[in-house]
Image (cartoon, helix red, strand yellow):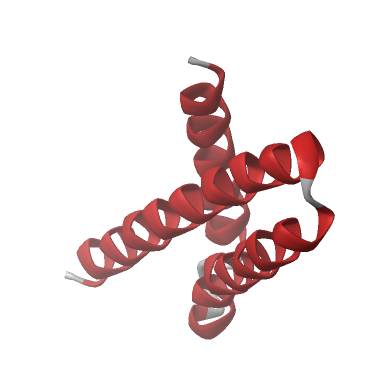
Amino acid sequence: MNFFLATVLLTVVIVSISLIFIKKKPFMYLVPISLVAISMILFMSSFFIGGWGGVGMIALSSSLLISSAAALIIVTLISYFQTE
């Protein structure tokens, strides 16, 4: 349940940060895309940490990856429907 709550909370935060920059279209999409890249780096580096710390980092990075991808889809849909 905590993983789901963290993912939803991160999605809301990322969407709200992206919508602050709604007038600047490229930067609006850059926020979730950069967080996807950061989550991939965290995921790769968690294998070098090992132990329970690495498992926790994998959980955090996968939650960030899912929420960033969902936020990118939501922001794209908002931008698409706002132009029409």
61 left or right of 46 in image? left
Residue 53: x and y in percent read 80, 39
- Between 27 and 3, the residue placed more toward the observer is 3
From the viewer's perspective, is residue 50 above or below residue 4? below
- Between 36 and 28, the residue placed more toward the observer is 36
82 left or right of 51 in image? left
Q: How many marks?
A: 0
Residue 8: x and y in percent read 48, 32
Q: Residue furthest top?
A: 1
Q: Residue furthest front?
A: 51
Q: Residue furthest bottom?
A: 26
* Image quadrant in which you'd find residue 84: bottom left
Residue 44: x and y in percent read 66, 67
At a point 63% along the width and 47% down the height, the residue shown is 58
At a point 58% along the width and 40% down the height, the residue shown is 10
* Image quadrant in which you'd find residue 81: bottom left
At a point 43% along the width and 54% down the height, the residue shown is 71
At a point 76% along the width and 34% down the height, the residue shown is 52
From the viewer's perspective, is residue 7 above or below residue 61? above
